[in-house]
Image (spheres, rainbow, N blue to C red):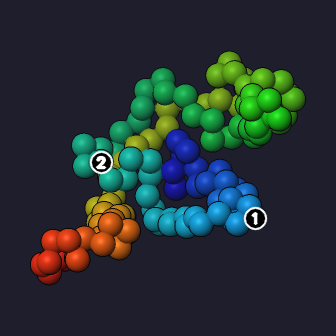
Amino acid sequence: MDNYAPVALCRAFVARLTKAQKDVELIEYPNAYHAFDASAYRPPSVLKGAPTTRHCLLVEAEDHQIINRETQRPFSYANSCVEREPIVAYNEAASSQAHAFIWDFLVQIFRLREYLNTDLP
């Protein structure tokens, strides 16, 4: 649903990392726009004039330069694939799920239950 930075780009990145045997996980939240965890975007907002590369096919060249795959030239925000005015919107359910996931992840990674010696949510 994110029309600012669509999840398809993340899926491709995660696929490359997985192929390289990196420990990575992608979690997608249905019906979530960009900035879904920012309650300031309730109601949804259009980012007037903001650019989005959601329809650009970008690749990284061997010299680490970002290339527009359609033109085979270095990417520029002047490229015709760049669009404007994406939507940002708060999604309470997605925000709650993301915060719970992050909390659980941090508790596990930093072994917080052991250090705090208390019952955490």
29 to the left or right of 72 = left
Instruction: Give the quadrant of residue 112.
Output: bottom left
On the image, the x and y values in percent for residue 17 come to: 68, 59
Estimate the spatial distance between the alpha carbons at disc 1 and disc 2, rounded to whole Å.
33 Å
Return the x and y of residue 13 as percentages of the image width and height: 67, 54
Q: Amino acid at mark 2?
A: Ala
Q: What amino acid type is highlighted by mark number 1?
A: Lys
Is label 2 in a helix, a strand or a loop? loop
Q: What residue is shown with label 2?
A: 38
Residue 56 in percent (x, y) is at: 71, 37
- Mark 1 and mark 2 lie on one chain; the one further toward the N terminus is 1
Residue at image position (64%, 22%) is: 77
Residue corresponding to mark 1: 19
Q: Which mark is residue 48?
A: none
Residue sitting at x 58%, y 64%: 24
Residue 78 in view here: yes
Q: Residue at x 69, y 21 (%)?
A: 76
Q: Residue furthest left?
A: 118
Where residue 18 sits, quadrant-wise, is bottom right
Could you say which is closer to the camera, residue 119 or residue 5?
Answer: 119
